[in-house]
């Protein structure tokens, strides 16, 4: 007996069963098949549910088993390749955001336990044709496949990683206001992305200040200005979400930004004629307080001089004394007069409704 035959006999005698021998063959030791006796080969066929004839010779049985296990190995390899392909499924890098792509690729390498010898081929297969062509020129006269994974990553980083100065990033951050179509969460996410390269020491405070300044809805801004100094960023964002949600709930999911402006006139406006007074005009009185509208004191003595206006968001007067509101209807188009008045009344009603909502919320808290 040679060493393989002795090992087979030992396995067979030690186990008393054929299971251990089958496991060894499945693991790749198909040479054992050619060292087994006919009786052992028949036991393997029976255990694996392989059809054979009692008249089959030893050579026929060995051929049947060898073909069977070879097919099993190929099937297993195909399954493993499909599994690995699905695990390697990340978006091809097309030149946009190298930092994000590299982090995803590193996760794929760790998750699939990719050996060092396959890291370069994996990286190359995840590059778009345009990026790979650019990489080829960068590596010339050598080919990308001949370089190390680290060297290729460094070349791609130099080519595609965005290099902005903190001053440029800060200018972009400070100039970014909420768009009319953006939700509170969308705007917050944008600010968090933009602040990454600004190198602020007080990043959360900077986001908080910019959020209050850049929010689109005047109603939300009014609430944030009233309570912003006492709240941290998370609480401030929650307050903005509450106002946004309350408005949508009360107005059938209509965008809250609609309360921030009046509908523009389409036709050429005409000035009112005759002796009719504008109902929004205020009587003149040199002793009248421009903060609250009362005539028994002046602005500097008014207890409401530090209040914020719910119409324009400015500090120093209340809603009924807002000049922006009072100037809205100076010009009038006869066919649209009622629409403009209804829109203004809707803003007033909405604000009153939200004030009630806020009082109930504070009471419940």
Image: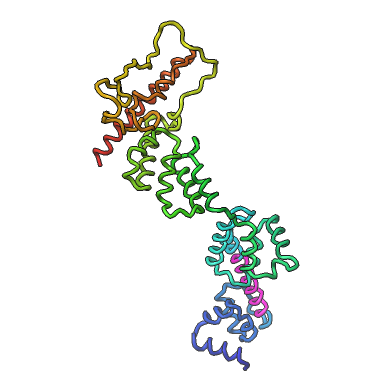
Query: Residue 241: x and y, percent?
Result: 39, 40
Asked where in the image residue 58 lies, by quadrant, the reply is: bottom right
Q: Is residue 355 above or below residue 193?
A: above
Q: Is residue 55 visible?
A: no
User: In terms of depth relative to the viewer, which is nearer, 15 or 149?
Assistant: 149
Bounds of the magenta span? Answer: 61-80
User: In terms of depth relative to the viewer, which is nearer, 4 or 232?
Assistant: 232
Q: Is residue 16 visible?
A: yes
Q: Is residue 254 magenta?
A: no
User: In terms of depth relative to the viewer, which is nearer, 273 or 100?
Assistant: 273
| Count of numbered labels shown in the rendering | 0
Q: Is residue 43 above or below residue 103?
A: below
* Residue extending farthest right: 141
Query: Residue 149: x and y, percent?
Result: 62, 68
Query: Residue 322: x and y, percent?
Result: 37, 25
Asked where in the image residue 212 lies, by quadrant, the reply is: top left
Q: Is residue 119 above or below residue 188?
A: below
Q: Is residue 76 magenta?
A: yes
Asked where in the image residue 142 lies, by quadrant, the reply is: bottom right
Report whether 107 appears left or right of 320.
right
Q: Which quadrant does the C terminus fall into?
A: top left
Q: Is residue 257 above or below residue 212?
A: above
Magenta stretch prevailing secondary structure: helix
Q: Residue at x 40, y 49 (%)?
A: 205
Q: Residue at x 33, y 24 (%)?
A: 290
Q: Residue at x 46, y 10 (%)?
A: 272
Q: Residue at x 64, y 54 (%)?
A: 95
Q: Which quadrant does the N terminus fall into?
A: bottom right
Report whether 279 appears left or right of 196.
left
Query: Residue 28: x and y, percent?
Result: 60, 78
Report whether 132 appears left or right of 301.
right
């Amino acid at each position: 007996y040679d060493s393989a035959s002795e090992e087979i006999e030992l396995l067979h005698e030690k186990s008393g069963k054929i299971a251990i021998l089958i496991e060894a063959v499945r693991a790749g030791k198909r040479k054992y098949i050619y060292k087994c006796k006919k009786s052992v080969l028949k036991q393997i066929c029976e255990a694996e549910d392989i059809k054979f004839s009692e008249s089959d010779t030893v050579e026929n049985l060995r051929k049947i088993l060898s073909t069977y296990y070879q097919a099993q190995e190929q099937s297993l390899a195909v399954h493993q390749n499909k599994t690995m392909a699905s695990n390697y499924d990340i978006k091809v890098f097309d030149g946009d955001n190298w930092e994000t792509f590299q982090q995803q690729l590193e996760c794929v390498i760790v998750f699939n336990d990719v050996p060092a010898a396959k890291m370069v081929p994996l990286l190359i297969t995840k590059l778009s044709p345009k990026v790979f062509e650019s990489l080829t020129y960068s590596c010339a006269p050598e080919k990308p496949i001949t370089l190390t994974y680290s060297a290729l990553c460094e070349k791609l980083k130099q080519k595609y990683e965005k290099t902005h100065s903190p001053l440029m990033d800060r200018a972009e951050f400070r100039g970014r206001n909420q768009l009319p179509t953006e939700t509170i969460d969308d705007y917050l996410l944008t600010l968090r992305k933009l602040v990454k390269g600004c190198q602020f020491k007080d990043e959360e405070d900077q986001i908080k200040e910019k959020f209050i300044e850049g929010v689109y809805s005047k109603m939300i801004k009014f609430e944030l200005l009233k309570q912003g100094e006492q709240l941290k960023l998370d609480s401030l964002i929650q307050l903005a979400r509450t106002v946004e949600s309350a408005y949508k709930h009360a107005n059938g999911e209509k965008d809250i930004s609609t309360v921030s402006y009046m509908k523009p006139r389409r036709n050429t406006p005409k000035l009112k004629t005759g002796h009719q007074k504008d109902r929004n005009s205020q009587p003149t009185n040199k002793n009248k307080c421009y903060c609250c509208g009362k005539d028994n004191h002046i602005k500097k003595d008014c207890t409401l001089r530090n209040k914020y206006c719910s119409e324009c968001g400015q500090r120093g007067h209340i809603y009924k004394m807002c000049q922006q509101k009072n100037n809205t209807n100076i010009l009038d188009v006869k066919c649209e007069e009622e629409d403009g008045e209804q829109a203004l009344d809707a803003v007033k009603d909405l604000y009153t409704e939200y004030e009630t909502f806020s009082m109930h919320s504070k009471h419940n808290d």
